[in-house]
């Protein structure tokens, strides 16, 4: 009885094995014939293959451009999700802004980490950066030019001054030539340690928010710093954003700020190395670094090709 059951089991296993071998052989032969036919067709009609591939790539490109999703909340969330519906409902109740976009600038000593930049030279270069990126920059949108004061977040409903935070506030952003008239590093330290140095809300300035790597003397006075931090705030408009929930004017302004900062670092910086911190900066800086790396690789390939041809 046991032998009968074992023989029946072996026959079943052999049958299944035979079926699996037949399936595998059929699939293998089918793929071999298909790829053989495809290879022959491509070899016989190379131009047709090239044209078909180009048209397919063009179709994918159209889809990539036309259906790009660049808003963070819908990038990984279905557009019909309840959270998206709730966000759109709340946005529809407000005609103004629900939030502002913060852009941070960080500056440290160029090619010499750990050095004091709380000097006349450091303050003057930081002022030049501020003038280039914030004061003098303009962005065109729908036929109109916008300055920073047009898109900044105001301090309050009764105070239209822009909400900013910077070491340059100790020098009134050079409005009365305070920076231009600085004669010694001690004047810089005196301005920073002035008990009347306040933020835009007239509160005592929190030094850790505008200075990095602070060194203090025995009396608690700041004597040196290794980095500056400056913040600007851009007013996000729901009216401009519409259903896309991405303000096109603020997007352009963010990109302009990043581009001007990178340009300043590449062409104008003599004392400071500048960093920008926000989403636009992350993508643009990554693109710049990637393009730079690709350019270097291409140069190496060209040099290698030229060297091999010369042998």
Image: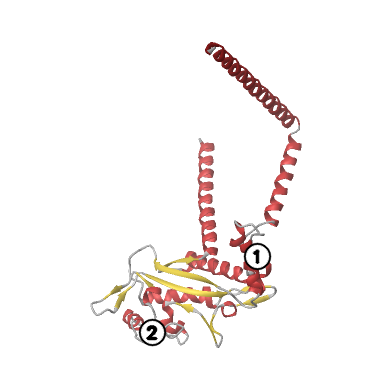
Residue 75 % position (x, y): 61, 58
In this orientation, which residue lies closer to the viewer: 41 or 297?
Answer: 41
Residue 117 % position (x, y): 36, 72
Placement of 87 over or under 79, stated as above or below:
below
Residue 59 located left or right of residue 7: right
**Few, some or many C-alpha atoms within 10 Å of disc 2 (few <14, some 14-19, many ≥20)?**
some
Q: Residue at x 70, y 46 (%)?
A: 57
Residue 267 % position (x, y): 49, 66
In this orientation, which residue lies closer to the viewer: 217 or 75?
Answer: 75
Q: Which mark is residue 85?
A: 1
Q: Which residue is mark 2?
A: 197
- Disc 2 is placed on an element classified as loop
Placement of 174 over or under 13, stated as above or below:
below
Placement of 175 over or under 119, stated as above or below:
below
Give the mark, 2 or 1, whose residue is nearer the N terminus: 1
Pair 2/1: label in front = 1
Placement of 103 over or under 3, stated as above or below:
below
- Disc 1 is placed on an element classified as helix
Mark 2 and mark 1 residues within 8 Å of each other at the beta carbon: no
Between the residue at mark 2 and the residue at mark 1, the CA separation in whole angstroms equals 45 Å
Quadrant position of the N terminus in the picture: top right
**Few, some or many C-alpha atoms within 10 Å of disc 1 (few <14, some 14-19, many ≥20)?**
few
């Amino acid at each position: 009885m046991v032998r009968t059951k074992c023989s029946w089991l072996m026959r079943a296993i052999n049958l299944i094995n035979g079926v699996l071998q037949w399936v595998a052989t059929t699939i293998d032969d089918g793929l071999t014939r298909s790829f053989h036919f495809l290879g022959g067709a491509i070899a016989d009609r190379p131009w047709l293959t090239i044209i078909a591939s180009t048209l397919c790539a063009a179709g994918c490109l159209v889809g990539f451009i036309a259906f790009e999703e660049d808003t963070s909340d819908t990038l990984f969330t279905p557009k019909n999700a309840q959270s998206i519906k709730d966000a759109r409902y709340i946005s529809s109740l407000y005609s103004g802004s629900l939030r502002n976009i913060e852009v941070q600038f960080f500056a440290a000593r160029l090619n010499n980490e750990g050095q004091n930049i709380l000097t006349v030279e450091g303050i003057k270069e930081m002022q030049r950066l501020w003038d280039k990126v914030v004061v003098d920059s303009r962005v065109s949108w729908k036929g109109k030019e916008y300055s920073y004061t047009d898109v900044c977040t105001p301090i309050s409903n009764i105070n239209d001054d822009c909400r900013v935070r910077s070491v340059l506030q100790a020098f009134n952003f050079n409005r009365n030539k305070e920076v231009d008239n600085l004669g010694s590093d001690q004047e810089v330290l005196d301005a920073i340690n002035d008990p009347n140095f306040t933020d835009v809300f007239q509160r005592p300035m929190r030094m850790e928010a505008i200075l990095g790597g602070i060194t203090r003397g025995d009396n608690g006075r700041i004597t040196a710093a290794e980095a500056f931090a400056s913040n600007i705030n851009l007013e996000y408009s729901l009216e401009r954003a519409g259903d896309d929930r991405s303000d096109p004017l603020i997007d352009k302004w963010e990109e302009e700020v990043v581009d001007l900062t990178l340009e300043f670092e590449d062409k104008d910086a003599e004392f400071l190395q500048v960093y920008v911190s926000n989403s636009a900066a992350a993508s643009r800086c990554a693109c710049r670094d990637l393009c730079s790396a690709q350019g270097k690789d291409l140069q190496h390939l060209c040099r290698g090709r030229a060297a091999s041809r010369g042998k």
